Image: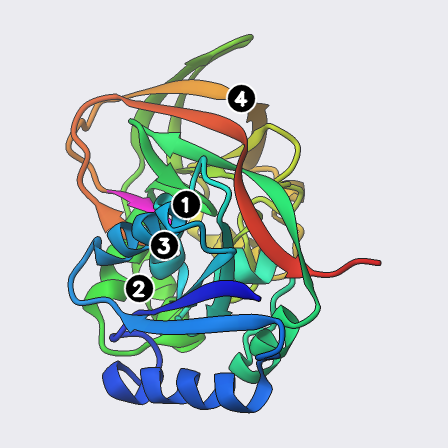
Amino acid sequence: MKNIAFIVNPISGAGGTKTKNRVSKLIRELLDLQQFSPTVITTEYPGHGTLLAQQFAMQDYYAVIAVGGDGTVNEVASGLVGTQTALGIIPNGSGNGFARHIDISTRMNRAMEMLNNSEIIKVDYCTVNNIPFFTTCGIGFDAQVAHDFEAGSERGLKGYLQSITKDIFQYKVEDYHLIGKDIDVETTAFLINFANASQWGNDAYIAPKASIQDGMMDIAIVNEMPLVKAPEFLWQLFTKTLDENLHVNTIRAKEVHLKRNNTTSLIHIDGTPTQIDGDLHISVVEDGLKVLVKKRF
């Protein structure tokens, strides 16, 4: 019998007790209780998911399942890095970028059923100034979108599109300097995104060729572009063709240092807007996290 824990974000999906009750119901109806012994717990404050995940890992749980969006996945996974306990995901957020990247259904019932026929793989994660991220970290336009999306009332794809449409015509470019092995790039950029996985969520692919098992991050640099090119940018973002845009350059690296003129500008970590002042140091941790995915054979 494998011990697994479900950590539920109370502000994702339906929220609070409703989400926890739904998860408990799906466990009773769909989870193989001959294979798994489940525990369900709800987070009570920001960062609680990390502490809970660490506690379950210390108790040698087989897996801890994050029930929520990319922010919840970040909290739970941050508590599991470097341990023998695997991360599982029941997507219930607005973007679900990491879950989508590893082909987990965004329908909660299907994601629950997948656990019955799953296996563990090792994947990379990244850090920015020693803070883990698992999907993407960005500065510039996408950080502003993350900020406005979080502050807005509309969730899901509609909310993202509203934030993107609003900000794309207002955001001012900034100057950056990227330094790393064989990398010395000074640029004025609309955004710079450091991608472990391929998308922001909601099938918006900022780094369509990114892999979580290659020991590298894909750094997407979107240069200043004419406003008339904005519709093309959005179209390519959702059709996995952004790397074909003449205003987008992609660099692959294991480690990079970012100097910025505006040292207090927002960044986002897995879609959550965050304030980190000064320069940024971003690096890849290879095979640092175990993840439950659909059994391949």
Could you give the CA–CA distance between mark 4 and mark 1, rounded to whole angstroms? Answer: 21 Å
Label 1 sits on residue:
80
Mark toward the viewer: 2 or 1: 1
Secondary structure at badge 2 equals helix
Camera sees residue 102: no
Amino acid at dot 2: Lys
First in sequence: mark 3 vs mark 2: 3
The answer to whether 263 appears left or right of 157 in the picture is: left
Q: Residue at x 22, y 71 (%)?
A: 152
Marks 4 and 2, Cα distance to the nearest angstrom?
33 Å
Q: Which residue is mark 2?
A: 166
Range of residues picked out in magenta: 267-271
Q: Is residue 222 left or right of residue 123?
A: left
The verdict on residue 270 being magenta is yes
Q: How far apart, in angstroms, are the residues tagged by discs 2 and 1?
A: 37 Å
| Residue at numbered disc 4 | 254
Q: Secondary structure at mark 3?
A: helix
**Cα–Cα gap, marks 4 and 3:** 30 Å
Give the mark nearer the N terminus: 4 vs 3. Answer: 3
- Secondary structure type for disc 4: loop
Q: CA distance from mark 3 to mark 2?
A: 42 Å
Secondary structure of the residue carrying tag 1 is loop
The quadrant of the picture occupied by the N terminus is: bottom right
**Vertical arrangement, residue 121 with respect to residue 65, above or below:** above
- Percent of width and height locating residue 32: 62, 79
Examine the rendering and report whether any part of residue 140 can be seen: yes
Residue type, label 1: Leu
Front in this rendered view, residue 105 or 120? 120
